Amino acid sequence: MADIIQLLPDSVANQIAAGEVVQRPASVVKELVENAIDAGATDIHITIVDAGRTLIQIVDNGKGMSETDARMALERHATSKIRTAKDIFAIRSMGFRGEALASIVAVAHVELKTKRKEDEIGTHIIIKGSEVESQEPISFQTGTLFQVKNLFYNIPARRKFLRTNETELKYILAEIYHAALGHPHIAFTVYKDRDLHAKYPATHLKQRIITIFGKRFEKSLLSIESESSICKIHGFIGTPDTAKKHNFNQYLFVNNRFFKQRSFQNAVIRAYGNLILPQEYPPFFIFIEVDPAHIDVNIHPTKTEIKFVDEYSINSIIESAVKYSLGKSNIVPSLDFTDDTDYNDMFSTPQSEIKAPSIRVNTNYNPFASHKADVKNWEQLFEDFENQPDPDIPEQTFASALHLESSEPHVPEATCLQIQKKYIVTQGKTGLLLIDIKRAHSRILFEQFLQQIQTSTHASQKTLLPIQIEVTHSECVILKQILPELQSLGFDIEEFGSQSFVIQGCPSSLETTHVESIIRDFIYDFNENHTNITEKMYESVAKSMAKTSALYRNVHMQQDEMQVFISQLFQCESHSLSADGKVAVVLLEYDEIFKKFN
Ligand code: ADP
Ligand code: MG
C-alpha cells in the first residue's frame, strides 16, 4: 500500500492556523495595530466598515517595509522581531510569532502599501486567499497601509458565526482601548463606517484615560507608583467613590501589553478594603514592567492571560502600592511606611520576604468603652445634640453632645484650629491636616456602629403594622434561600401565600420605614453577586445610621474636644474618608507649603 501522509499546502496550513489567530474582526484590528506599534508608528488611523466585515484599514507612519520584506511579511513564521529561541525571553515587541499576517491573508482580500523612509518608491501588494495577485511599485508616504476586505469570504461557517455588528464593534473598540491605553504617546484616530468615531491625540496616560473614559475621571484618579527589583509599577486607580458594580474599567498591562489576571485584580480590591462595598469594583489602570524573561506571553495567540514567574510577589506589590496610594492621597500620616517597613527597599532583594505595609489601627480600641452611654441605645449619644434647635449656641459644646470625657484616649498635643466651624486644621507628621468635621464625624460613627452591630446580638423590634412584600417568581426563590439568614439577623419575616411575604419585625438598629427597600436590595444584591447578606446588612445599616446622625457643621469645638475628635478619627480604619466614601481629610504637605514660598 502506498504511503498516505502528505504535507499540507501552505494555503491550507495558513487557513487552519488562521482559525486560531483570527477569530473575529477584532483579532485583525488587534494584530494590525500591534504591528503598527511595533513599527514605531506615532500616528495610527483605523477605519472600520460594517463592523469589520467589509473593511478594516490600518494606516501607520511607522518604519515601513522594503519590497522584499513586504512580500516576506505575509509568509508564515516570517518575523523581524526574533531570530533565535533565546530572543523569545527578551521580547519587548507586541508580536513575535510571525503568523498574524500569514493568517489574515489566508482568510481575506488584503491590500498592502508600504514605504521606508530611505526608499524613494514604495511597494503595493494585492493578495487574495494567500495568493499574490499583483506586486507593483507605488508612490506612497513613509509607513504602512493594510486593507483587509471581506473577512472570512472563504470560510462561510466562520462568517456566519460572527455576532451582530454592535457586538463585533464592541470587541473591536475593546482592542483599540487596550492599544490606546497601553501607548498614550501614540495618536489614534478611529473612523467607523467612514465617519470619525474617536480621536486620541498623543498625550500622557492620565489624559488618555480621561479622553477615552470621560471627564468624570478628571478628579478621581490617584496615581500609583512602585519600584523594586521584581517589577516597576505605575498607573492610576479610582477614588473609592468611583467603584461600580461592574469591572469594565479594570485594566492591567505588562510591558505595555494588556492582560487579564484574576489574582492581580483581587489584590487591588483587597487593598481598598472596606472603602468599597463587597460587590463593588474600583476602576484601575495599572502598568507593570518586568524583565521579559520573567513572563511567558507565549501561551496562545489570542489569549490575554500571561504567566508570571513572580506572580505571588507582584500580587503583594500591587496590593501595597494601591494601599499606599489610597493612604497617601487622602492622608499620609496614617500609613506608617517608614518605621518598620521601608517601602522602597521592601523588594530590593529577590529573596526578601514580601510584607504589605501595615496600616496602624488599634484593633483593641472600643469606642464605647469610655462612654457612659448604654451601648444598646447608641442613638442616645446623639439625641442631646440633635434636639438642639441651634447648634451654634456656645454652651452646647461638642463634648457634651458626644458625651466625651476628658479621660479619652491620649491625643498628640498638637494645636488644633477650627475654621469656619466646618473644618479643623492641625499638624501631622508630614504636613497640615485639614479635616472636614461633618464627613469625619460620619466616618467615626460608621465604624463605631459597624463594630457595635457586629458584636451585639440582633435584637428585633416590631414594625408598626405588618409589611407585605410581593415578589416575582425568581425573587421568591432567592428570598426563600436567604430567609434563615434574615431571620437570624432579627427580621421577623415569613412566607405568606405564593410570591408574597410578610414582615412583622426587623433588627432594632434599622428604621422600620426602610425595611421593604432593604429587603429588596438584599434580594437584588444576592442575585447579582451572591453577597454575604450579613456583611452587607452591617455595612448598609452602619452607613445609613452614620449619615443620619452625623454632626452638622457649625458647632463650636473646644481645643480638647478637637483633639479627642481627631484621636477618634484616627482610630478608624479608613479615617480619611466619610462614611459614604468622600474625602474627609486633606493633607497639605510641608514640602508643598515650603515650595509656595520659594
Ligand atoms: P510578528 O508581528 O509576530 O512579527 P506578523 O505576521 O504580524 O508577525 O508580521 C510579520 C512581520 O511583518 C513583522 O515582523 C514586521 O517585520 C513586518 N510588519 C508587519 N506589519 C508592519 C507594519 N505595519 N510596519 C512595518 N513592518 C510591519
Ligand atoms: Mg504582528
Image (spheres, rainbow, N blue to C red):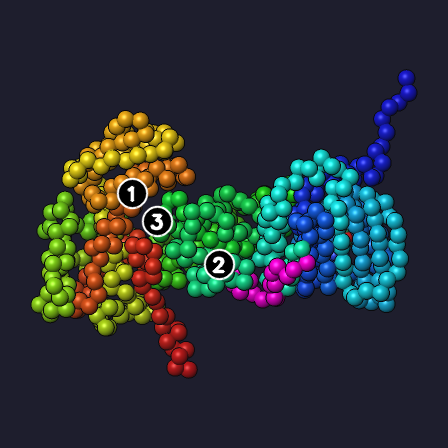
In the rendered image, residue 227 lying in the magenta stretch gets the answer no
Type of amino acid under label 1: Ser
Q: Which mark is residue 274?
A: 3
Q: Which residue is mark 1?
A: 517
Percent coordinates x, y for residue 585 in the rendering: 31, 63
Q: Is residue 454 above or below residue 559?
A: above
Neighbourhood count class around disc 1 (C-alpha, 10 Å): few under 14, some 14–19, many 20 upward: few
Type of amino acid under label 2: Phe
Tell me the CA gap for discs 3 and 2: 19 Å
Asked if the residue under mark 2 is in contact with the one under mark 3, i.e. CB atoms within 8 Å, the reply is no
In the image, 72: left or right of 585?
Answer: right
Asked if the residue under mark 1 is in contact with the one under mark 3, i.e. CB atoms within 8 Å, the reply is no
**What segment is highlighted magenta in the picture?**
194-209
Tell me the CA gap for discs 2 and 1: 35 Å
Percent coordinates x, y for residue 374 in the rendering: 11, 47
**Mark nearer the N terminus (3 vs 2):** 2
Q: Which residue is mark 2?
A: 236
Asked if the residue under mark 1 is in contact with the one under mark 2, i.e. CB atoms within 8 Å, the reply is no
The quadrant in which residue 191 appears is bottom right
Q: Is residue 206 above or below residue 501?
A: below
The quadrant in which residue 424 appears is bottom left
Neighbourhood count class around disc 3 (C-alpha, 10 Å): few under 14, some 14–19, many 20 upward: some
In the image, 454: left or right of 205?
Answer: left
The quadrant in which residue 437 appears is bottom left
Tell me the CA gap for discs 3 and 1: 23 Å
**Mark nearer the N terminus (2 vs 1):** 2
Query: Residue drawn 30% across and 53% down?
Result: 573
